[in-house]
Image (cartoon, rainbow, N blue to C red):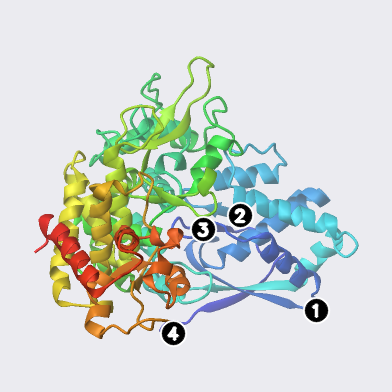
Amino acid sequence: MLDCKLKPIQISIDDIFKDVIYVVPIYQRNYAWNAKQIEQLIDDINSAENNYYLGTLITNQKEPSVYEIIDGQQRLTTLYLLKLYLSNNLNQKDLCKGEPLQFEARKKYRNTLICLKNSSVINDEIIVPELYDGYIAIKKYFENNSNILNPNKFREKLKRVYLIRIQVPKNIDLNHYFEIMNTRGEQLELHQIVKAKILEKLEKPEDKEIASKIWDSCANMDSYIQMNFNTRIRNSLFSSSWTDLQEEIIDNWDNLVQAFTHQNKEKSFDKCSLKEILTEVNIENIKNLDDEDYNDNERFKSTISFPNFILQVNAAINNDEKNDYSLDDKYFIEILKNNWADEKTSKNFILKMLQCRTLFDKYIIKREYAKDYQKIGKWSLQKLEKYTNKNENDNAKPIYKSTYSKSDKEEEDNITQKLRTLESALRITYTSPKTMHWITIVLKNLLEDKNTDLIPVLEQYCLGKISDSNYKNKSGFDIERIVFSYLDYLLYRDNYNNIVEKDWEFQFRNSIEHFYPQHPDNGEYWGLNELNDFGNLALITVSGNSKFSNMPPSAKSDYKEIINQSIKLRIMSIIVNNNDKIWTKELAEKHKQEMINILDNNGIK
């Protein structure tokens, strides 16, 4: 509990927006209520017979009659949408005079509410879909339930339904209050607290707005960062091909601001207001969100979440790739606190976040769900490029090509293939975000030199992990998974005996398989040393291990789908087929020595 006395005031919903302004600060999450939540609120109000209390609204009074929303903005925003609907339906404009609900530095929210209030034509590019969808949900619910929902009677009920507005004391530590609230329901997440603290250090409103825009764009991890900005900003922030961040923007806040407040360099570079830039609609240059090209951008799934990405950025710029706690979200606020020491450090973090996110999308694998892989997905390492069909005079649209590709051919180039396979080996090995230090290493090296050859960098990282694991002196489940994963990568990279298909890729596997079973249905029992020896083991999926059960190696070799999960296992299967369907301790030992030699020859001590 806080050591402060809060002052409650009872206000009816009918009067909640009268002669007052509520400001939703920029650090608050976006509006997120769905139709089910909205309909439940309407039902609660409609079922009220006497006085009814909807809950609390916690505020911080900034000026006379101006309140900053600390807690309750989802409900308050829904109530405002409800009153907008009643105002339009009943033609009672007094219900929503002025602009009683405002969103700090989010002009699209303001534009949306103005359009809804004035029953204006809605343009997809200048509205907030969540607000519009909320309004439509209210409209449809009233229309579909007209037998029980009468707008006039419902408006009367609002006079008997109350919110309790609680004003926090002046000079309270709001950051501390946010962290306390974070333990409750739909409250601020830790990354939103960090956003609030960083933006708090920026003095100019336009700086806050730009930083917030970048933050929110980076937060959408499943879409390439370029596509999280409108076309005008995209052309200013990124290169002519859209692939890379403009060089002059990196480490230069003033140039970043200019990119947001000027037209595309290809045009006249005339000065425009920030409002125009952030809300401008250019139908000729922006594809409709329903178009296939834009839906294509939704086919990707990021390797990590946004909060972990923030930790990765911090670790990369602070050279913390060897710190075991640098990616541990249990210490999220503590790890990141140095990034809002002053305005300079806050701006630097926003710049680095944008730079790292651009590099992340281009050089870190994603899962891609498209075409033949729409359901199961596949590993993807691609860059986004701008494409224009000049012959047909088409508008610019995004296309996705292999990261290191220098042509328009669809085939994946060899460098991209190797890096994609190497990164996927690490991804399926280190599944917890707090252990994905390899991503930090990639970002750190690219920040230092964007032309860094990442393959030897990550190979060296794997070599160190395997050497530290002391795998030669371990057996069975004590052998770390990176040994199996990296060995399969080497076998793929060097196309061992020409048995590896070009499109082979790692699956999510973490189950150590005993090729000769621990409890055979038929045949002799091997001793524990032979059973758990590296030569008799491979790494496959849990379901594959379950299917194999206690089958002999000769029977397992017929399950090609499982055998192909591991190149090492495939080699073992070939050995069995070449030896009259027999797998012996001697063959396992010979196979072990060959695999160890491959690891040794690649620098593993």
Front-most of 61 and 497? 497
Left or right of 453? Residue 346 is right
Badge nearest the viewer, 2 or 4:
4
The disc, 2 or 3, on the residue closer to the chain's N-terminal end is: 3
Residue 343 placed where, x, y %?
A: 26, 52
Pointers 3 and 4 in contact (C-beta within 8 Å): no
Q: What element carries label 4?
A: loop
Q: Mark 1 points at which residue?
A: 50
Left or right of 584? Residue 156 is right
Numbered label attached to residue 102: none
Query: How crowded is the residue under tag 3: few (<14 C-alpha within 10 Å), some, or many (20+)?
Result: many
Q: Name the residue under label 3.
A: 24
The disc, 2 or 4, on the residue closer to the chain's N-terminal end is: 4
Gap between marks 2 and 1 measured at Cα: 27 Å
Outermost residue, top side: 391
Look at the picture and state if 534 lies above or below 274: below
Query: Which quadrant does the N terminus fall into?
Result: bottom left
Q: Is mark 3 on a helix, strand or loop?
A: strand
Amino acid type shown at disc 2: Pro
Amino acid type shown at disc 3: Val
Residue 136 placed where, x, y %?
A: 72, 51
Is residue 79 visible to us here?
yes
Amino acid type shown at disc 4: Met
Left or right of 152? Residue 86 is left
Q: Name the residue under label 2.
A: 100
Query: How crowded is the residue under tag 4: few (<14 C-alpha within 10 Å), some, or many (20+)?
Result: few
